[in-house]
Amino acid sequence: MVHVYTGDGKGKTTAALGLGLRAAGHGFRVCMVQFMKGNLVYGEQKAARSIPKFEIHQFGRKAFVDRDRPGKVDRELARKGLDFARLAVTGGNYDVVILDELNVALDWKLITLEDVLALIRDRAPMTELVITGRYASPQVMELADYVTDMREISHPFQKGFLSTKGVDY
């Protein structure tokens, strides 16, 4: 099946990690490919090291990508991530592949819609595919079996609170 977790609310990556954790608990092989993320302080990076058959690979810089003017390095890293994801999704080596923030990389034009749609269509038959990030395209959602739209109603950021270690990263 193909899952899409999108929307402006919190919890997309967290939901994908929960699905991955559940799958790993049953002995499934899980690969998470993180687009636009290149910082090893994320809690999931640390936790995955202790979970058998759960890998996380990052394709991004530590700095945030400028949506209006992404750098050449951002496009190159996204392309490398997509190439890695293609192998993970089509190779049959993983039971679950999570493409974290793929929707954002697509919306910000770091990768092309055609490449993403081909990746979804070409996935190995028994590979569960999870795609996260705001701004999911209608075409990606159309190919999905599950689509969940996380809607923000309230968030501490609105009151001036910054990200919280262990909760937000």
Image (cartoon, rainbow, N blue to C red):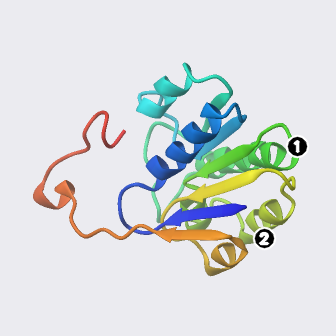
| Residue 121 placement (x, y as % from top left) | 83, 66
The picture places residue 125, in percent across and down from the top left corner, at: 87, 56
Q: CA distance from mark 2 to mark 1?
A: 20 Å
Q: Quadrant of residue 166?
A: top left
Q: Please tell me whether mark 1 sits on a helix, a strand or a loop.
A: loop
Q: Where in the figure is residue 69, as x and y percent of width and height?
A: 50, 61
Quadrant containing the C terminus is top left
| Residue 128 numbered mark, or none | none
- Tell me if residue 54 comes above or below residue 142 in the rendering: above
Residue position marked by numbered label 1 in the rendering? 91
| Figure quadrant of residue 48 | top right
- Which residue position is annotated with label 2? 114
Taking depth in this image into account, of 159 and 69 the one nearest to the observer is 159
Whether 4 is drawn above or below 156: the answer is below
Q: Residue furthest left?
A: 159
- Mark 2 belongs to which amino acid? Glu
Position of residue 97 in the picture relative to residue 148 (left or right): right
Q: Residue at x 47, y 24 (%)?
A: 46
Q: Residue furthest top?
A: 50
Q: Residue at x 84, y 37 (%)?
A: 93
Give the mark nearer the N terminus: 2 vs 1: 1
Residue depicted at x 69% and y 62%: 2
